Amino acid sequence: MNLIPQIGPIAALVAGILILIMPRLLNYIVAIYLIIIGAVGLFGK
């Protein structure tokens, strides 16, 4: 199974739910999301 293509939509769903619950988390969620996507892009080959 290749889980890499599923990380984006799952992360977006979790981030959306957390932002709805606590809008102040937006900065942290965006930063973590960008770090994860960047790491997957660099090391996911």
Image: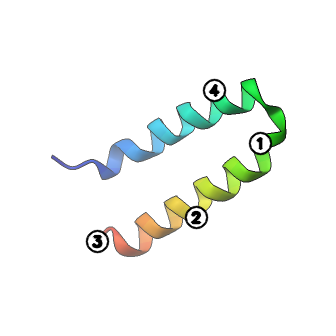
Residue 12 rendering spot, x and y as whole percentages: 56, 38
Q: Badge 4 is on which residue? A: 17
Q: Secondary structure at mark 2?
A: helix
Residue at numbered disc 1: 25
Q: CA distance from mark 3 to mark 4?
A: 29 Å
Mark drawn on residue 45: 3
Residue 13 falls in image quadrant: top right
- Mark 3 vs 4, N-terminal side: 4
Real-space Cα distance between discs 1 and 2?
15 Å
Q: Earlier in the sequence, mark 4 or mark 2?
A: 4
Q: If you read the primary sequence from the N terminus, does the residue marked by circle 3 or circle 2 appear first?
A: 2
Q: Which residue is mark 2?
A: 35
Image coords of residue 11 (percent x, y)? 51, 41
Amino acid found under the numbered disc labelled 3: Lys
Q: Residue placed at 52% from the left, 67% from the top?
A: 38
Secondary element at image label 1: helix
Answer left or right for 34 relative to 5: right
- The kind of residue tagged 2 is Ile
Quick check: 43 left or right of 9? left
Q: Quadrant of the C terminus?
A: bottom left
Residue at point 55% right, 33% down?
14
Question: How far separated are the C-alphas under marks 4 and 2?
Answer: 19 Å
Viewer-side residue, 33 vs 21: 21
Amino acid under disc 4: Ile
Q: Position of residue 4 (x, y in %)?
A: 32, 52
Q: Residue at x 77, y 43 (%)?
A: 26
